[in-house]
Image (cartoon, rainbow, N blue to C red):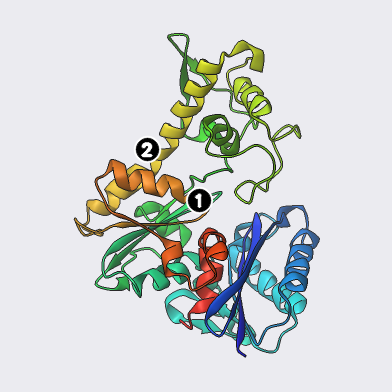
């Protein structure tokens, strides 16, 4: 039996998928916080390995190098790779370097620029094996990757995060993490434009919870703590959003709270739509190409496709796994792709 574990080691989550003989048999993710100290990255990796068990091969991609735990991204790549190799402890462990493929431990320092935040390309390559033309949208908890697929290959223009942000292939707009006031300076309340307080009072998870896109309680789509440490309930989310207006939760009616959340959600979606428009301006996406959705927020990718008159396909369609695991694998697309595809 050939067992491969694909790892996606991020600044907020450690995600992993185990494949046996080309079929996903387990998927897991854990919250992590390397900015609080590397022990907060080591423990989730160790716990994940204990859950998934030993494997023949380990394939690793990362975004944790962006954490401010590290002085710069290159230092972060080398540090995360060393940490992962130590905690995983496997002889066959290789690191994904985007278009270069996989590199070993000895090549990490020289390949750091290619290894840094290359996870988007791993899942994009899997999509390209199934779709000749598409826009792959991985809408995760923190960011949205927008990967054009043309003629059966990844046709991204950018490689680094800075390049991808500038050319429309990355948006810091996620389903649950991030601040709502990052997308709007004002919100309409009682017929007036009210400035939003620029404090960490709420997150996009509160917006999703009020809208009904996120259930109350702990969810794989929302593993981060709340801004105020209070529960993940609709009532508590309403109170957190009200603070952005300088109000208490009791100062908003049900209708007003829902309208506020809907406004903030639309403001975030406009940022993603602007990046798609930038891609369209250089003909990066074929006119009839479908949108392919992955990530915990892929329901929003489906809505984007409908609003733009596009077809939609779910990343889970490309995953060989028991039915009950396919959705989880689509939530952790880069990890699943690395487990399934020898790129």
Q: Quadrant of residue 131?
A: bottom left
Q: Do the residues labelled 2 and 1 touch (CB within 8 Å)?
A: no
Above or below residue 95? Residue 31 is above
Residue shown at 58% from the left, 14% from the top? 252
Q: Where is residue 28 in the image (x, y as percent from the top left)?
A: 65, 64
Badge 2 marks a residue whose secondary structure is helix
342 sits to left or right of 309: right
Q: Residue 327 carries which label?
A: none
137 sits to left or right of 86: left
Q: Can residue 3 be seen here?
A: yes
Q: Position of residue 298 (x, y in %)?
A: 45, 51
Above or below residue 250? Residue 304 is below
Q: Give neighbour class at mark 2: few <14, some 14-19, many 20+ (Cα, 10 Å).
A: some
Q: Give neighbour class at mark 1: few <14, some 14-19, many 20+ (Cα, 10 Å).
A: many
- Residue at which label 2 appears: 270
Residue shown at 60% from the left, 48% from the top? 221
Q: In which quarter of the image is residue 203?
A: top right
Q: Where is residue 10 in the image (x, y as percent from the top left)?
A: 62, 60
Of marks 2 and 1, which one's residue comes earlier in the chain?
1
Give me the C-alpha separation between circle 2 and circle 1: 14 Å
Above or below residue 305? Residue 76 is below
């Amino acid at each position: 039996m050939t067992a491969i574990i694909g790892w996606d080691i991020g600044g907020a989550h450690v995600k992993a998928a185990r494949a046996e003989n080309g079929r996903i048999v387990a998927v897991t993710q854990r919250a992590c916080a390397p900015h609080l100290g590397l022990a907060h990255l080591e423990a989730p990796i160790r716990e994940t390995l204990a859950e998934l068990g030993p494997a023949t091969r380990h394939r690793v991609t990362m975004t944790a190098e962006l954490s401010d735990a590290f002085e710069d991204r290159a230092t972060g790549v080398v540090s995360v790779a060393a940490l992962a190799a130590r905690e995983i402890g496997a002889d066959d462990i290789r690191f994904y370097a985007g278009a270069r493929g996989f590199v070993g431990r000895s090549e990490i320092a020289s390949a750091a620029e290619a290894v840094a935040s290359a996870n988007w390309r791993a899942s994009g390559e899997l999509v390209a094996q199934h779709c000749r033309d598409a826009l792959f949208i991985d809408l995760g908890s923190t960011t949205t990757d927008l990967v054009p697929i043309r003629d059966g290959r990844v046709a991204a223009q950018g490689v680094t995060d800075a390049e991808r942000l500038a050319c429309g292939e990355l948006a810091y707009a996620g389903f649950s993490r991030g601040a709502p006031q990052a997308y709007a300076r004002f919100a309409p309340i009682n017929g007036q434009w009210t400035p939003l307080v620029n404090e960490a009072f709420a997150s996009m998870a509160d917006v999703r919870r009020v809208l009904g896109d996120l259930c109350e309680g702990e969810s794989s789509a929302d593993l981060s703590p709340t801004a105020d440490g209070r529960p993940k309930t609709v009532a508590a989310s309403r109170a957190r959003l009200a603070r952005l207006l300088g109000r208490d939760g009791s100062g908003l009616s049900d209708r007003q709270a829902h309208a506020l959340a809907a406004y903030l959600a639309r403001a975030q979606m406009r940022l993603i739509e602007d990046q798609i428009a930038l891609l369209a301006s250089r003909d990066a996406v074929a006119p009839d190409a479908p949108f392919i959705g992955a990530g915990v927020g892929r329901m929003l990718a489906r809505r984007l496709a409908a609003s733009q008159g596009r077809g939609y396909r779910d990343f889970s369609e490309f995953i060989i796994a028991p039915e009950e695991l396919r959705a989880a694998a689509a939530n952790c697309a880069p990890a699943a792709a690395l487990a399934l595809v020898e790129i």
